Image (cartoon, rainbow, N blue to C red):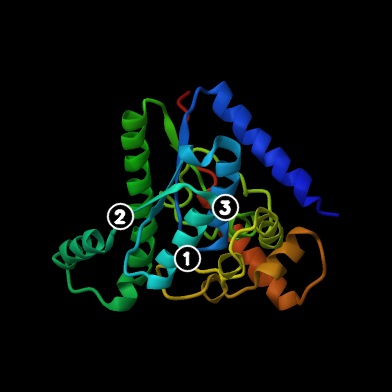
């Protein structure tokens, strides 16, 4: 039985203790307009006070609704929300890449998708350093990945895999939704179809599998064998994202 009240209290205490023990002041995170970042923002506002939470919208050829949904989250939890448009930065980068050769859209597809979260994470860390200077205390970056995403490696190395503290890493999508409902995340956000807000595709379209099936595989539950094998292949093929090999001298 998932005791959402206890889970929220435990996460809140974890955040408070970590910040106290490490003499930290605040947190910065990208607010995508989706459930994961909304829940993370709500948890940090609860633990640290909304005045110590900075949310950032980082559009990059994104849907306009993502920004308005992010505003709903900021209004709900009372934290500062700023906008840093990465579209011209991305366009300038791609323009320089195009000078390197005549590449097809298919050849560039994966690189173009992954540079966006990397630009976003660089921006969030920049703002964390800036706010540390402005506020007279250390701001760190919060991650927003959930357990299902991590299991199949649905994140970008050097992008959304990079953060200083994670609080949803051990919660499935369904559990994140329950936490969001408990925190009273706006309904339009907590039940929004998950997407990265960058590629124009839903998460499940990109992955080719359902989040509920990923959770079932992790829990040892029986599902269609074809779907199970897809999920296991994603899991095994993404292990390089978790372990960086380092040569040890004799």
Residue 32 visible to an observer of this rendering: no
Residue 241, image x and y in percent? Answer: 51, 51
Question: Quick check: marks 1 and 2 in contact, CB under 8 Å?
Answer: no
Vertical arrangement, residue 238 with respect to residue 208, above or below: above
Callout in the foreground (1, 3): 1
Q: SS at mark 3?
A: helix
Earlier along the polypeptide chain: callout 1 or callout 3? 1
Name the mark nearer the viewer: 2 or 3: 2
Q: What residue lies at 62% left-to-right and 69% top-to-bottom? A: 191
Q: Nearer the viewer, residue 189 or 37?
A: 189
Q: Residue at x 70, y 55 (%)?
A: 182
Residue that carries the numbered disc 1 in the rendered image: 69
Q: CA distance from mark 1 to mark 2?
A: 16 Å
Q: Quadrant of residue 115?
A: bottom left
Distance of label 2 from label 3 (alpha carbons) = 32 Å
Looking at marks 2 and 3 on the same chain, the residue that comes earlier in the sequence is marked by 2
Disc 2: which residue: 84
Residue at point 81%, 53% (across, down):
2
Mark 1 / mark 2, whichever is N-terminal: 1
Rendering coords of residue 55 (x, y %) = 43, 49
- Name the secondary structure under disc 2: loop
Along the viewing direction, whichever of 51 and 218 lies nearer the viewer: 51
Q: Position of residue 80 (x, y in %)?
A: 42, 47
Q: Looking at the rendered structure, which numbered label has been put on residue 239?
A: 3
Mark 2: few, some, or many residues within 10 Å (few <14, many ≥20)? few
Left or right, 56 with respect to 13, comes to: left
Q: In this view of the protein, can residue 89 be seen by the observer?
A: yes
The vertical placement of 176 against 126, above or below, is below
- Dot in front, 1 or 2: 1
Percent x, y of residue 75: 49, 55
């Amino acid at each position: 039985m998932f005791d959402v009240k206890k889970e929220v209290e435990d996460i809140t205490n974890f955040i408070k203790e970590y910040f106290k023990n490490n003499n930290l002041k605040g947190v910065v995170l990208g607010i995508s307009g989706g459930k994961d970042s909304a829940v993370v923002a709500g948890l940090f506002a609860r633990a640290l006070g909304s005045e110590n939470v900075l949310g950032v919208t980082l559009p990059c050829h994104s849907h306009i609704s993502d920004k308005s949904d992010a505003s709903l989250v900021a209004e709900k939890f009372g934290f500062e929300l700023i906008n840093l448009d990465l579209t011209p930065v991305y366009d300038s980068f791609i323009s320089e890449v195009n000078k390197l050769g005549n590449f097809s859209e298919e050849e560039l597809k994966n690189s173009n998708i992954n540079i966006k979260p990397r630009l976003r994470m660089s921006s969030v860390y920049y703002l964390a350093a800036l706010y540390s200077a402005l506020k007279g205390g250390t701001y760190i970056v919060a991650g927003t990945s959930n357990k299902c995403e991590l299991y199949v490696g649905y994140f970008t190395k050097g992008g959304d895999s990079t953060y200083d503290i994670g609080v949803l890493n051990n919660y499935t999508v369904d559990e994140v939704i329950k936490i969001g409902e408990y925190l009273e995340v706006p309904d339009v956000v907590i039940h929004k179809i998950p997407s990265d807000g960058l590629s124009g595709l839903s998460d499940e379209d990109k992955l080719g599998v359902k989040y509920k099936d990923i959770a079932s595989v992790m829990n040892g539950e029986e599902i269609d064998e074809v779907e199970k094998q897809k999920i296991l292949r994603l899991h095994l093929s993404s292990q390089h994202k978790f372990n960086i090999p380092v040569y040890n001298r004799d």
